[in-house]
Amino acid sequence: MVFSNLVFLFMFLPIVLAAYFLLPKMFKNFILLLASLIFYAWGEPKYVILMLVSILMNYMFGLMVHKFRDQISYKKMTIALAVIGNIGLLGYYKYSNFFIENLNNVFGLNISNEPLPLPIGISFFTFQAMSYVIDVYRRDAAVQSNIFDLALYIALFPQLVAGPIVRYNTVAEEIKKRVHSFELFSEGVRRFIIGLSKKVLIANPMGELADTLFAMNPGDMSSGTAWLGIIAYTLQIYFDFSGYSDMAIGLGKMFGFNFLENFNYPYISRSVSEFWRRWHISLSSWFRDYVYIPLGGNRKGPWKTYRNLLIVWTITGFWHGASWTFMAWGFYYGIIISLERLGLSKVLEKLWSPLQHVYVLLIVMIGWVFFRADSFDYSFNFIQTLFGMNGTQALDNSTFLYLNDYGYVFILGILFSMPVMDWLRKLLYRENSFIGRWAVPIVSPVVYMALLVFVTMFLVNSTYNPFIYFRF
């Protein structure tokens, strides 16, 4: 089940909200946990067992780490087993096919390789569960003795399948005691509708175009058409994932949880390092705190810093998918960020501001080619087409046809990938503004209801409603 689904919007969510707010306080966590397990089981019921195993395993490891908190050797052995157990669980389902295929290719073996379906959201809930045990080990979080409370933290449906990756200590108190108010609920509804609109009205049309163009042979399209393809994917992945994060944050507020922000307009960045401080913030901070800093971070000299950056970014790429193109994508960013630390950032600071943005967008879009394509051959051929290096036309009739069909979505996507709404909000709510004080409160509900109606119309009339982060 996904949030941009009519069953979720008009059946699952209303029923859960009604049960949650009508039943006494003592049942609220139970309702949320039951709803979360049903939500996860909707697509593939058997994988609920996998999630329950993950919950039980990390619950036990948390208790053991706490028990051995003053016995250093036992505590280290326990945390090592916890990390191995979680990585092993993730690795079996997500990476075993990749390793077997490569062993067969390199050594000429014939190991049986039955493809394993990837459990939805396994990367997200595994990292979340693992961070809990590590935080207990570091004494950054208190151990949870109630397995149902820990289960709710790991399985909570608003952020279950695509994040943001929530740290246990940020919601530990809210699991026990949450504040509910009409204002917080209203804010959550508005945030949810914004995220839903981003997903359905922008990400879906852009995804439809990106899928069409990336299914073509790069040699059969013009440079202009190739640029439309990668720009469409650039907008799709941002509005799809940031829209999901907005919906997760909005749902959290409806139920009294305050999740941290996960996106901060990354496409307005002036450096690649800044881009990754704004994109998927919860994942970037997870790798920083649980991989980069334990490796030594930037505390052991420049060369080890660059080594650590390359290791972390290669692992980040591999986290996204079991293929060499994902690893190359991560390594690519490790190199770029290392170059910026070496001095490229100082050069960028001296450039005209628009050129800084162009630099970031070019780097990011070239990276998205490797992220989106299924092979290196396709990636390199596509990039050659982008820059007119394989003899294709600059523009053709297809370019103008796609622009005619999707031009308005490109405009909306580019416009709302910038903080236009923040600028508009500051303008409307400036001190003593009549519009901000009187007109906006009246017009705002109408706008949000209109957006919800438009989204519903799109969902009723379209069968194209993918969620690209399901593959992670």
Image (cartoon, rainbow, N blue to C red):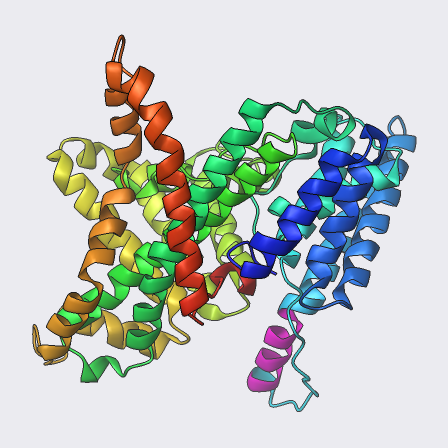
Q: Could you tell me residue 234's position as x and y percent?
A: 31, 57
Q: Residue at x 74, y 61 (%)?
A: 89
Q: Residue at x 18, y 61 (%)?
A: 407
- 189 shown above or below 374: above
Residue 405 picture location, percent across and down: 20, 68
Is residue 49 found left or right of 349 in the rendered image?
Answer: right
104 displayed left or right of 456: right
Q: Answer yes or no: is residue 196 visible.
A: yes
Residue at the (26%, 68%) spot, across then down:
229
Q: Is residue 336 above or below residue 293?
A: below
Q: Horizontal and vertical percent for residue 361? A: 24, 50
Indicate whether 372 appears above or below 14. Answer: below
Front residue of 295/13: it is 13
Judging depth in this view, the residue of 219 and 78 nearest the camera is 219
Q: Which residues are magenta?
A: 95-105
Image quadrant occupied by the N terminus: bottom right
Q: Quadrant of residue 385?
A: bottom left
Query: Residue 242: percent from the left, percent from the top?
Result: 43, 46
Residue 314 in magenta?
Answer: no
Number of residue marks: 0
Q: Main secondary structure of the magenta part?
A: helix
Q: Nearer the viewer, residue 427 or 449?
A: 449
State whether residue 279 appears in this view: no
